[in-house]
Image: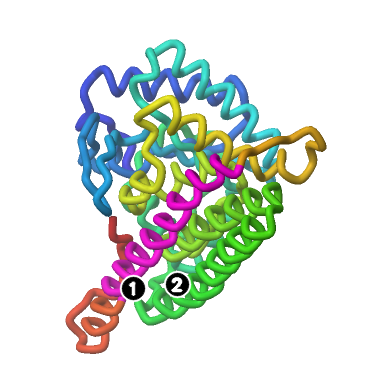
């Protein structure tokens, strides 16, 4: 794994050094790895996109893998990394967003041994920001493209179908004027669609219900998901927050209120996310199918299956 940040501007190097210190202040970890566009050098600081007929703005995150030496308490680790992220934002003016992935180092090594392409990409492209020196990373097992394709399609079939079912339940509940159950199921549909994308592209999914964080994880593989719910206006932001909070509020808060008008405004966003999910997953399948054909023809080096972005 690489260790040099020489390809980045000095400002970004200082930011990553600060972020590393803040993580170590909050959480005992064994390794901190930068992956994604900032590791490769093809990051974007600001861009305007038009996907699915929707204008969105895009900027690359610092994608940070945090490896712990024992199985992490997910909620505790999430809270502490959120604290580190907030401190980082305050100190840098929130100029570079951060997306964390936290794993038990034993799990990460198992993924490498299994040859899961997203994690082998991290090993190949990533930059080590911190290493306790207590552990070593496994050598990845070459994974045949046909295996990747079969697993990815199985995950897609399961999670996309669940998302569509939740969407249908939400529409039925809306017709029956059960607004709480409707908005909860629209949230669940979004969660399933995001899981379908990350599973197809990584063969793993975040243990997460926060739509903002699920969107951030999916954006790494398919920036088109930003078109699902652009946050250009205060009303957009308010509606997204309504959808995000529905997982808890619609189930557990007896005083929770939502209007049919808000649900009607949110519904097309959820429908669009389903369309985006289908399109970006089919794109990944097409890339894997091409690799299968090349491997079967003996023209492809089978030592590496790279994640398409």
The residue pinned by badge 1 equals 285
Query: Which one is earlier in the sequence, the residue at label 2 or at label 1?
Result: 2
Quadrant of the image occupied by residue 26: top right
| Range of residues picked out in magenta | 260-288
Contact between marks 2 and 1 (CB within 8 A): the answer is: yes
Instruction: Determine the residue positioned at 74% across, 35% down.
Output: 256
Q: Is residue 224 visible?
A: yes
Q: Is residue 304 visible?
A: no
Instruction: Determine the residue positioned at 56% across, 58% down.
Output: 189
Which label number is shown at residue 152?
A: 2
**What is the x, y in percent for residue 146?**
37, 81
**What is the x, y in percent for residue 117?**
40, 63
The secondary structure that dominates the magenta segment is helix
Q: Per the image, is 271 magenta?
A: yes
Quadrant of the image occupied by residue 162: bottom right
- The residue carrying pointer 1 sits among few (fewer than 14), some (14 to 19) or many (20 or more) residues within 10 Å by Cα, namely some
Of 67 and 226, nearer the camera is 226
Q: Secondary structure at mark 2?
A: helix
Q: CA distance from mark 2 to mark 1?
A: 8 Å
Of 83 and 54, nearer the camera is 54
**What is the x, y in percent for residue 139?**
44, 61
Q: Per the image, is 38 magenta?
A: no
Instruction: Determine the residue positioned at 38% across, 72% down.
Output: 142
Of 107 and 154, nearer the camera is 154
- The residue carrying pointer 2 sits among few (fewer than 14), some (14 to 19) or many (20 or more) residues within 10 Å by Cα, namely many
| Residue at the outermost right position | 254
């Amino acid at each position: 794994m690489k260790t040099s940040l020489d390809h980045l501007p000095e400002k970004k190097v200082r930011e990553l050094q600060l972020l590393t210190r803040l993580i170590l202040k909050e959480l005992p970890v064994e390794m901190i790895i930068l992956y994604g566009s900032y590791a490769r050098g093809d990051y974007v600081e600001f861009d305007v996109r038009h996907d699915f007929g929707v204008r969105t703005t895009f900027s690359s995150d610092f994608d940070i893998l945090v490896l712990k030496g024992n199985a992490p308490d997910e909620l505790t680790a999430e809270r502490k990394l959120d604290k580190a992220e907030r401190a980082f934002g305050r100190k840098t003016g929130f100029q570079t967003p951060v997306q964390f992935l936290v794993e038990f180092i034993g799990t990460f090594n198992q993924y490498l041994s299994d040859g899961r392409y997203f994690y082998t990409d991290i090993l190949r492209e990533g930059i080590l920001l911190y290493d306790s020196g207590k552990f070593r990373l496994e050598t990845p097992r070459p994974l045949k493209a046909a295996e990747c394709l079969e697993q990815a399609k199985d995950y897609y079939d399961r999670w996309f179908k669940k998302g569509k079912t939740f969407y249908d339940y939400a529409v039925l509940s809306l017709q029956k004027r059960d607004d709480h159950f409707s908005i909860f199921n629209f949230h669940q549909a979004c969660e399933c669609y995001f899981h379908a994308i990350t599973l197809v592209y990584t063969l793993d999914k975040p243990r997460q219900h926060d739509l903002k964080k699920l969107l951030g994880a999916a954006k790494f593989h398919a920036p088109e998901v930003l078109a699902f719910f652009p946050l250009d206006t205060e009303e957009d932001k308010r509606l997204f927050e309504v959808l995000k909070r529905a997982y808890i509020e619609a189930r557990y808060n007896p005083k929770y209120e939502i209007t049919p008008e808000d649900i009607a405004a949110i519904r097309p966003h959820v429908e669009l996310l389903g369309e985006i999910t289908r399109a970006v997953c089919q794109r990944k399948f097409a890339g894997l199918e091409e690799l299968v054909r090349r491997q079967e023809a003996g023209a492809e080096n089978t030592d590496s299956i790279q994640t398409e972005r």
